[in-house]
Amino acid sequence: MKRLWYLLTLGMLSVTAHADQRPNVLLIAIDDLRCDLGVMGVEHAKTPELDGFAKTARLFSHHYVQVPTCGASRFALLSGRYPTAAVQVSNNAIRDTHPDWGTRSLPAHFRSNGYQTLAMGKISHYPGGLTGADWMVGPEELPGAWDRCWIPEAPWTTAEGMMHGYAGGVPRDRGVSPPSEAF
């Protein structure tokens, strides 16, 4: 991960040196997708919109998770640090450690260099960036990093419901398999 962070930092520094020619930057993070995209050579995958977009973009095909949990992997990506302490390998790694590195995070770096930073959905661990009740109120998970952080309009009534629910707004009861008609 240190190498990826270094490469991203170099790219951002060259971008900020030419402020009048700065490109737009879009990071798409998708949980549990693996590399099952047509553009990645997976023939059975039917992903025409992502494949078309990828043809006009810079595709990074060698990013690997640092820890097999989403919160810790997102901590590594956004902080540029390999998780080395127990607090950094939990799903609350960003929320619980941001005072140590949050002002130097990937989105904070872009923001401090004149970019507008927007996060929709689950970029850090909490969709919408809030950690309070139902993940709909503060405190922020990564304060000061985003100009706007929100969840998309969807049938789920809360951000937590969106992350832990099924398609069509069907809620999930933890530890209980849903009836097959829920899918």
Image: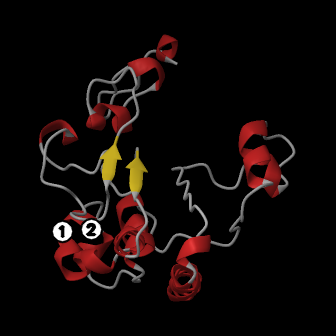
Which is nearer the eye, 181 or 12? 12
Q: Residues within 10 Å of mark 2 (few under 14, many from 20)?
A: many
Counting from the top left corner in percent of width and height, residue 85 is at 27, 83
Rendered image quadrant of residue 150? top left
Residue 95 appears in the rendering: yes
Query: Looking at numbered disc 2 in the image, what kind of residue is underneath it?
Result: Ala
Horizontal placement of 91 versus 39: left or right?
Answer: left
Residues marked 2 and 1 touching at CB (< 8 Å): yes
Query: Looking at numbered disc 1 in the image, what kind of residue is underneath it?
Result: Asp
Q: Residue at x 43, y 65 (%)?
A: 115
Q: Which residue is mark 2?
A: 93
Question: Which element is circle 1 on?
Answer: helix
Counting from the top left corner in percent of width and height, residue 67 is at 44, 71
Query: Is 158 drawn above or below residue 1 in the view shown?
Result: above
Which is nearer the eye, 54 or 127? 54
Residue 1 appears in the rendering: no
Which is nearer the eye, 90 or 78? 78
CA distance separating discs 2 and 1:
5 Å
Query: Is 148 drawn above or below residue 62 in the view shown?
Result: above
Q: Which mark is residue 96?
A: 1
Which is nearer the eye, 183 or 19? 19
